[in-house]
Structure formats: C-alpha cells, structure tokens
Image (cartoon, grey):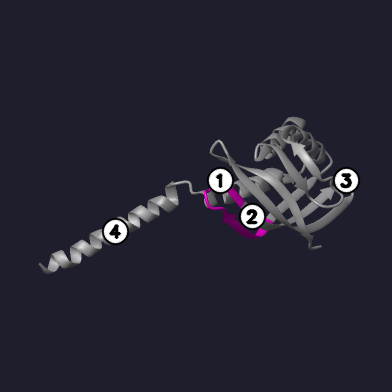
Amino acid sequence: MKNLRILVPAVLLLAAALYFGARYLWLEDDERVIHGKVDRLVELAGKDGEETVFVGIGRARDIADHFAEEFWLDLGRPFPSGRSSRDELTGAVAQARGNVNELRLRVSDRDLEIEEGGERAVMKLTGHGHLTARSEQGRDARRFRIEWVKEEGEWVIEKVELLDSLD
C-alpha cells in the first residue's frame, strides 16, 4: 500500500513531464516557429566576404520567401517605403548583397504577441547591423514592428515598420 502511494504520483508526474517535454521539444507551436523564422532571416541576411551571383540570388529568394506575396515595408531612411512584392524584394536584396562585402546582423529585445485565433501576430524587435561596403563601414540599430500572418498554415511577414533609429 505504501509503495502504491508513492508509485501513483510518480507515474502521474512522469506522464505530465513527458507530455509537456514532448510538446515543447517536438511540436511546432507558433511562437517557436516565428522566432525560428526571425533567426533564419538573420542567418540568411548575413554575409562574410565574396559570394557568387547565384548564392546571392538564392539567399535573396530565401529571404523573400519569408514574406507574403504582397507586403508593406518601411525600413527608414535611406530605404524607400511602401507596398512591395516578393519578386521586387528578391531583386532589391540581390542587388544590395552585390554591393556589400560583409554584413553581420543580430536581433535583441524581441516581444511577440499572437492574436486570438492564431492567424496573426505582431513582433517588436531591435535589429543591430554592422556593414562593410567597399571602403565604408557602418553600424546601425533600429527598432521594428513586424506583422505576421498565417497563409496556408505558414507564417509570413505582411508588414515591417520602423519604430525608431537607435544609432
């Protein structure tokens, strides 16, 4: 009887730990997916030295695939703002990558809220960049608001809005 009193709570605790552990480790919840997409964008945008035109175009396409077919983009000066498409973004990113020797990015201060219903989300984050282009170098930090929408089960960016330039 004494062993049963210890065994039942232990089994229940183990079952709960397995359930929540499996849910955390193996199931794709929306927050983890969106944070993973931001991490992937940072990785794709980075550049360490020369790359072939094909690599640059491939990276540009991979970046554009994180966006809705049509989206709103406001990155602040000197970049243009307004409605854009994946094809336009691919071209702009490929061209920009060709003019950059090195680009290092990191993201901090992420704040993500998924709206009720789970089809829309808003993330605020700070992006930090270090750029080397030809003989120029620069650092920049900006705070952005990113609106995500779930299209056909996939989270994509619908709007990027500059909130503040920090440097």
Q: Which mark is residue 14?
A: 4
Which residue appears farthest toward the top when viewing the image? 54
Which amino acid type is marked by label 4? Leu
Number of the front mark, 1 or 2: 1
Number of the front mark, 4 or 2: 2
The mark that comes first in sequence, 4 or 1, is 4
Q: Which mark is residue 119?
A: 1
Which residue corresponds to mark 3? 134
The mark that comes first in sequence, 3 or 2, is 2
Query: From the viewer's perspective, is 18 left or right of 54?
Result: left
Q: Which mark is residue 123?
A: 2
Q: Residues within 10 Å of mark 2 (few under 14, many from 20)?
A: some
Location of residue 97 by image quarter: top right
Number of the front mark, 3 or 2: 2
User: Is the C-beta separation of discs 3 and 4 under 8 Å?
Assistant: no
Number of the front mark, 3 or 1: 1
User: Is the C-beta separation of discs 3 and 1 under 8 Å?
Assistant: no
Q: Nearer the viewer, residue 24 or 56?
A: 24
Which residue appears farthest toward the left when viewing the image? 1
Q: Residues within 10 Å of mark 1 (few under 14, many from 20)?
A: some
How far is mark 3 from mark 2, CA to CA? Answer: 33 Å
Q: Nearer the viewer, residue 73 or 2?
A: 73
The mark that comes first in sequence, 4 or 2, is 4
Q: Residues within 10 Å of mark 4 (few under 14, many from 20)?
A: few
Q: Give the image location of residue 87, x and y in percent.
A: 74, 32
Q: Is residue 129 above or below residue 1?
A: above
In the image, is residue 119 part of the stretch drawn in magenta?
Answer: yes
The residue positioned 71% from the left and 45% from the top of the image is 45
How far is mark 3 from mark 4, CA to CA? Answer: 58 Å
User: Is the C-beta separation of discs 1 and 2 under 8 Å?
Assistant: no
Which range of residues does the magenta coloring cover?
107-121
